[in-house]
Image: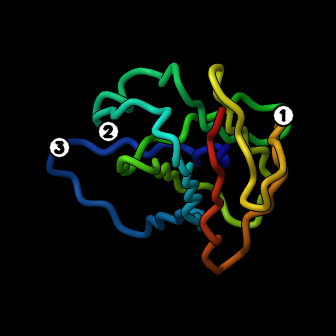
Amino acid sequence: MWPQPQTPVQVSTGEALAGIQIVAPQGVALNVQVNDPQGLLAQTAPQQSAQAPDAQLQVLVRQANLLPYRLPLAAQSAIARNYSLVVPAATSLLLTVRSPQASILTQAGALVQGETNLSTPSGSALSPLQFTIQH
């Protein structure tokens, strides 16, 4: 999803370098909240979620024609899960929120089917995206 890195620089132990610029591309935080008012999702430790995919809920993001990245679980409560990942700014992305056991609804109440198109802003924050899981 991120641009390919620049040419690597070899540095020996104790060697000092001058005239090298490190430029990091600008990113924005993609925050996704999945509300769970019916308590369908089991509580999962964030470190466990980072190690293994969640069988109950998948939150993925990708660029067209590229493999998806799983958004890691950042926080949870009895009624919601929050996922967060820094993504490139000024980029068109495809977001997937799905569950094999329940329906996913947008904040407006529409059923989510397939991928959601979104564009990340350049130089500003991306508003958190909210979904709801329900039977």
Please name the residue shown 82% across and 43% down the image: 111
Q: CA distance from mark 3 to mark 1?
A: 50 Å
- Residue 96 location in percent, x, y? 72, 38
In terms of sequence position, does the residue under pointer 3 or pointer 2 come before the other? 3
In terms of sequence position, does the residue under pointer 2 or pointer 1 come before the other? 2
The C terminus is located in which quarter? top right
* Contact check, label 3 and label 2, Cβ < 8 Å: no
Q: 101 and 118: which one is in front?
A: 101
> In the displayed structure, would residue 54 be above or below residue 117?
above
- Mark 3 belongs to which amino acid? Thr
Per the image, label 3 sits on a secondary structure element best described as loop
- Characterize the local packing of mark 3: few (<14), some (14-19) or many (20 or more) Cα atoms within 10 angstroms: few
- Residue 43 location in percent, x, y? 34, 34
Per the image, label 1 sits on a secondary structure element best described as loop
- Mark 1 belongs to which amino acid? Gly
Q: Which residue is mark 2?
A: 46
In terms of sequence position, does the residue under pointer 3 or pointer 1 come before the other? 3
Q: Of the residues tagged 3 and 1, which is closer to the observer?
A: 1
Please name the residue shown 43% across and 46% down the image: 9
Q: Residue 1 vs residue 34: left or right?
A: right
Q: 26 and 85: which one is in front?
A: 85
Q: Which residue is mark 1?
A: 114
